[in-house]
Amino acid sequence: MQALKDKILSEGKVIGDDILKVDGFLNHQIDTKFLEEIGCEFKKRFEGCKVDKILTVEASGIAVACETARQFGSVPVVFAKKAKPNTIVEGCYSAEARSFTKGTVANLRVIKRFVSEGEKLLILDDFLASGEAAVALIRIAEKAGAEVVGFGAVIDKTFQGGRKRIEDMGVRVEALASIERFESGKPIFTNDN
Ligand code: 5GP
């Protein structure tokens, strides 16, 4: 998605060797007009796929998931919670994921009532790095007996291995911008999207 690559180049900031900050438009302040373009692009990429629900993880995946859900005819969005609040008093599906940015392990949880056997799920997140969050969401879908139609990331840092990990699980991956490496503080994109 060229508009996304342009926005990353003009507004993104590379931190250290492997972190890209896009908090000015994607995961702190949100450019809602641009978010609509992201939702439309995911709809285009997964055109022809039946999607009953979108599954994501709090917090940064939620906005992307909601906008994309609108493009799929306002299907529900379910987001996995990273901590167990007192309000969860019923059965959950859970799976562990090591946080790439925090270095901690979170137990992602989804109440069983919100993901059902046979449901077709599109899984989305803002970033795909090592694939920890994506794998945990896929495991949750598997535990529920739901079908994963694909995984979509707004930004994929291909060099961190997550994409291969998900594809090796037999799940289709679509990324709107894929970064091959960082060079002199700038992202270098792969040519395939
Ligand atoms: P993974 O689980 O694939 O290793 O990492 C994906 C998760 O970590 C995403 O949910 C995202 O919030 C966070 N993340 C990974 N890499 C980056 C990055 O370069 N920048 C930001 N802002 N978040 C990232």
Image (cartoon, rainbow, N blue to C red):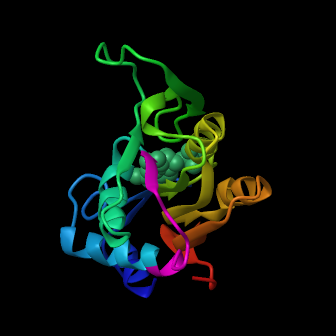
In the displayed structure, 32 sits above or below 147; it is below
Please tell me which residue lies in front, 22 or 165. 165
In the displayed structure, 67 sits above or below 81; it is below
Q: Is residue 163 visible?
A: yes
Q: What percent of the width, then of the height, locates residue 105?
A: 55, 26
Taking the spot 24% from the left edge, 62% from the top edge, the residue there is 24
Taking the spot 57% from the left edge, 72% from the top edge, the residue there is 178
Q: What percent of the width, then of the height, locates residue 27?
A: 31, 54
Q: What percent of the width, then of the height, locates residue 30?
A: 22, 61
| Image-based side of 155 in relation to 79, left or right | right
Can you say which quadrant of the picture contains the C terminus?
bottom right
Taking the spot 44% from the left edge, 48% from the top edge, the residue there is 56
Taking the spot 21% from the left edge, 68% from the top edge, the residue there is 31
In the displayed structure, 158 sits above or below 63; it is below
| Image-based side of 94 in relation to 52, left or right | right
Please tell me which residue lies in front, 181 or 177. 177
Q: What range is drawn magenta here?
A: 44-56
In the displayed structure, 191 sits above or below 90; it is below
Identify the image quadrant of residue 86: top left
Q: What percent of the width, then of the height, locates residue 137?
A: 56, 42
Q: Residue furthest right?
A: 168
Q: Is residue 111 visible?
A: no
How many numbered circles does the render carry? 0
Residue 87 among magenta residues: no
